[in-house]
Image: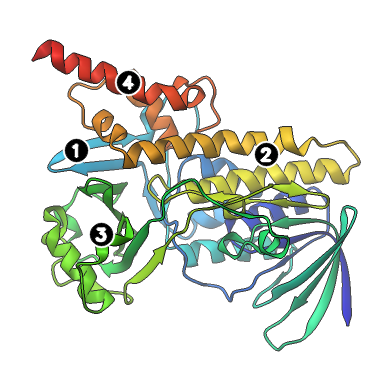
Amino acid sequence: MKKESVDVLVIGAGPSGTIAASIINKAGYNVRIVEKMKFPRFVIGESLLPRCMEALEEAGFLDAVKARGFQEKFGAKFVDQGKICDYFFADQFTKGWSWTWQVPRGEFDKTLADTVESMGVPISYETTVTGIEFNGTHSTTTVEDVNGEKSQIEAKFIVDGSGYGRVIPKLFNLDRPSSLKARKTLFTHVVDVNRSMADEPNRITIIVHKPAIWIWVIPFSNGKTSVGFVGEPSFFDPYKGTPEEQLRALFESEPYLRERMKDVEMVFEPKVLESWSATSSTFYGDGYVLTGNVTEFLDPVFSSGVTLAAVSSQLAAKLVIKQLKGEKVDWEKEYTEQMMQGVNTFRTYVNAWYDGTLGKIFFADNPNPEIKNMICSVLAGYVWDLENPYVKNHDTALPKLVKLIELGKKLTA
């Protein structure tokens, strides 16, 4: 059996894997990526957050992404029965990037992968990890290519950025259920000929369809738009027929979309995803670290997936370099606790979205601009800024704010 030795093996060629691979490679280490799929491939997570830009910049990817001409994104618009709440990233509390992109992920991910290959990091596509044996921090990984040929890769460290594939959690029984409710989405891309009817495309639009049921509208620079409905699985039960018939009926049921999506061409038959939330019992071990969706995937509502993937891989790469240099790394304190700060902040906002707390804040009359800017920082992905009280006190700040809003209504009634 063919054997190869590298410093670091990266599993997965999505944003998490390529960002980590690039940063480690730039530090002078020998890196190889194995990827189960053939690129480009379809995946959701199409609306980035400004915090991603810092990781893309450190990885050396910004110029390549800019050259693709993806749709620039400057904020997020929330809509509920005619009420509109706009968040513009330029107004955020935290100092950082004030814009990012909306991207067809197949093209975006391939851009990152092609760029990291041009930096000297080889990628083996259509290659599946079938087993991993650890000997301390060193490992031997068995992989199988598309032709069924097996080989082994010896590494001093593994970065698992395999996303939904969750390679190491599945191999070593680390998968754990998420605390979030199971939800479902039905979505597609459309040829958005009626886009001029809306004040897009420079931000994502999130529409409250019914309590705990929402819609995303993500315009791309190529004239296509990603649109999907999200909610509890039972919400979709009354809609019968093919996936396309179901989604067209859903378009018709939403006043904000009825004319916009009337008779639009669907680029592909609508897809279904459900019960996507997942977590792991640990984010690291002797000789490996989990990054991106392999750690914990929450919910698509605030586009946190790619941000957590980018930041976790950026942080993990630096710690891997530190360890390979022979320096001591406290993975619990320096990695898990750092990542859980971001995950838990996003989780609070996800739960507050579904239980109606955020709706009361977003659509309140005369919102406090300073508080709005603090919340805007969360929506921009700056969930590690402990100078922001709506990050530091994320679990208590939102309910307190709602109480103040309700008190104000009573005083003016």
Q: Is residue 343 left or right of residue 374?
A: right
Q: Mark 1 sits on what residue?
A: 84
Q: Secondary structure at mark 3?
A: helix
- Do labels 1 and 4 touch, CB within 8 Å? no
Amino acid type at circle 2 is: Thr
**Alpha-carbon span between mark 3 and mark 4:** 30 Å
Instruction: Return the disc, 2 or 3, that comes first in the chain's sequence.
Output: 3
Q: Secondary structure at mark 4?
A: helix
Instruction: Return the disc, 3 or 1, that comes first in the chain's sequence.
Output: 1
Counting from the top left corner in percent of width and height, residue 381 is at: 48, 38
Amino acid type at circle 4 is: Leu
Q: Mark 3 sits on what residue?
A: 235
Residue at horizontal 32 percent and vertical 65 percent from the top? 187
Counting from the top left corner in percent of width and height, residue 73 is at: 37, 46
The answer to whether residue 411 is above or below residue 348 is above
Q: Mark 2 sits on what residue?
A: 336
The answer to whether residue 348 is above or below residue 60 is above
